[in-house]
Amino acid sequence: MVGEPIEKIKKAEENSRNQMKEAQSESDRMLREIRAKAEELAAEAKKQIAEETKLVIKKAEEEAARIVAQLQEKNEVAKEEIRSTAESNRSKAASFITKRVIV
């Protein structure tokens, strides 16, 4: 008779330990899943950032190429203006030099 409540207590303790082990196992499993999901999200974020970075760099390179092309065009115009001015002043310069040398 006295042994019967003790048996019930032991069984309850055993059940409690088993439930705690199951809860711990479930907690561990959930934690592994959460970590895996977090790693997956972090990898996806890194991938997205890398893609966006490439896009920004590509746009910057395109803008730089456009600016370089504009500068080259302006340089060509300036060179032509200088060349034209030099050509138009060639005879004046030659005359000036000739007058200085002959005089």
Image: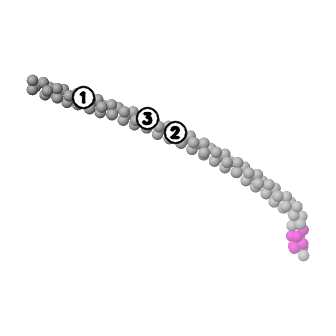
Q: Quadrant of the N terminus?
A: top left
Q: Residue furthest front?
A: 1
Q: Amino acid at mark 3?
A: Lys
Image coordinates for residue 79, horizontal then vertical, percent = 79, 57
- State the extent of the magenta-drawn residues as a range: 95-102
Out of 72 and 47, give the one closest to the viewer.
47
Circle number at residue 18: 1
Q: Amino acid at mark 1?
A: Asn
SS state under label 2:
helix
Q: Which residue is mark 3?
A: 37
SS state under label 3:
helix
Residue at x 40% of width, y 35% of height: 34
Residue at x 29% of width, y 33% of height: 24
Q: Earlier in the sequence, mark 1 or mark 3?
A: 1
Q: Which residue is mark 2?
A: 47
Q: Quadrant of residue 11?
A: top left
The label nearer to you, 1 versus 3, is 1
Q: Quadrant of residue 50?
A: top right
* Left or right relative to 55: residue 23: left
Out of 98 and 6, give the one closest to the viewer.
6
Q: Amino acid at mark 2?
A: Lys
Neighbour class for label 2 at 10 Å: few (<14), some, many (≥20)? few
For the residues labelled 1 and 3, the Cα–Cα distance comes to 28 Å
* Left or right relative to 90: residue 10: left
Image coordinates for residue 37, horizontal then vertical, percent = 43, 35
Q: Quadrant of the C terminus?
A: bottom right
Residue at x 36% of width, y 33% of height: 30
